[in-house]
Image: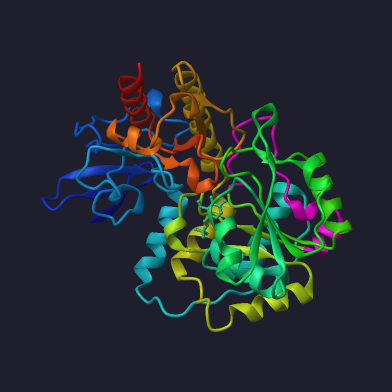
Amino acid sequence: MVYAALSKSSKLSYFLVDKGDNIVQTYTDNMTSNIASDPVSGNTQKDTDPMSVNNNYDFDTIVDRHNTHSSKWDKYKHQDIIPLWVADTDFKVAPVVQRAIEERARHGVFGYTSTDKERDQVVANYYQKKYGLHVEADWIVWVPGIVASLTLAIGSLSKQHQQVLTPDIVYPYLHTTPAAVGKQANHLAMTYAEDRVRIDLDALEKRNAKDARVMLFCNPQNPGGAIYTDKELSRIDSYCEVNDLILVSDEIHADIILDDNKQHLPYFGTSDYALNNSITLGAASKAFNVAGLACSWAIIANDDIRQAFKHEMHGIISEINPFGYVATLTALREGDEWLCAMNQYLRTNRDYLLEQINAIEGLRMLPLESTFLAWIDVSALNLKDPCGFFEAAGVGLSPGSNFNDNNFLRLNFGCAKSVLEEAVSRIKKALV
Ligand SMILES: Cc1ncc(COP(=O)(O)O)c(C=O)c1O
């Protein structure tokens, strides 16, 4: 149960109490202190060390996700395995997002929910403010998930027997959605040059794309976390123009930037051709940890492509739920400060992990520019079942084979640093 109280300093405090009315968590504006128990070690934590509070936001406290039907945590229910697989973080949402959801929940009526120009304009404003790119509110189409949008895009734009170009090493649904709508996925060669996993553009430019109409793209790239540069985007754009391709750009990880000198650039900003021949898929789900609220947007500037996409939705795609809208729009409007702090926390985790993993013989973690998903080369260990090996050591990772590279494992470091430290110590115990 949550109680709220206004203090003398006019700060609103929220108290989370257990069934015995003991306060187990206090939130005061952006500050969080707690005495929650650590689901990994079972230890009870004291109030958060002020030194560990990052920019007034707390990412160190471990939130117990057991008994919340969390896909990530339920996979290893009743097993002593730290789940570092599926791509959601263990962080609580930004306090502004939490408050907006609570306010909407208090209304108590949750019927069918629609959008309007004002809501769509929030997304448009976000692209203007963040990237200096003009987006019309009319170009926004809301879809409960990005995977659904991949399917809709391929279904609406590809003719029968047309191939769908897609990166060879990528988030699995970019491989599987073409077949789901009766098309054939045609894999594009990748390069690991400079330790950045990305489409091999030299190979791409030599490739005949006559049989294809749609190309799928993942930027930032999952796995590997490379952010495509403007030069790389221009080469992809030229290739698409020469071959009359429509590019479907999955940019779900765009808000997670781990290097100060790196910047995500939405593909549609590359040229007029890109603007008029692309679908950009975005969401607050990864960066703001609201994937369970099922809300994403597609930006489609071209009227014909947008109408075809919308037509494909008919009778299949349900409306966005009210909490999805509230969380997403609040995150875009007011979440920036929290996002900066979260990115900073992820940077620290990334740096720690890079140092630790690369000091272990047989493991090699690639540096990453975006995402909270470390891509670790385990081929030197010659393991038959790499994922099983690390599960036996008490750490649950994603098999590289899911992304089409058996040599690697993916580790989700979107968690409290102490959880990461425990995972690293288990990995070391198994290997050192
Ligand atoms: C690149 C990429 N696209 C799409 C998704 C899933 O998106 P959604 O949950 O909106 O379908 C993920 C989730 O991990 C992802 O990493």
x and y percent of residue 228 in the render?
Answer: 72, 41
Q: Does the magenta stretch include residue 208?
A: no
In the rendered structure, the answer to whether residue 85 lies left or right of residue 241 reads: left
Q: Residue at x 72, y 75 (%)?
A: 159
Q: Quadrant of the C terminus?
A: top left
The residue positioned 62% from the left and 34% from the top of the image is 369
Answer with left or right where residue 99 lies relative to residue 189. left
Residue at the bottom extreme of this rendering: 315
Question: Which range of residues does the magenta coloring cover?
Answer: 253-277
The residue under the point 50% across, 33% down is 346
Question: Is residue 164 shown above or below 85?
Answer: below
Is 262 a magenta residue?
yes
Image location (x, y in percent) of residue 423: 34, 29
Q: Can residue 61 be seen in this view?
A: no
Give percent across and percent down for residue 368: 59, 32
- Against 309, residue 345 (above or below) is above
Residue 260: which quarter of the image?
top right
- Report x, y in % for residue 29: 41, 44
Q: Left or right: where does residue 300 sit relative to residue 27?
A: right
- Dominant SS of magenta comes to loop
Quadrant placement of the N terminus: bottom left
The answer to whether residue 12 shows anywhere in this view is yes
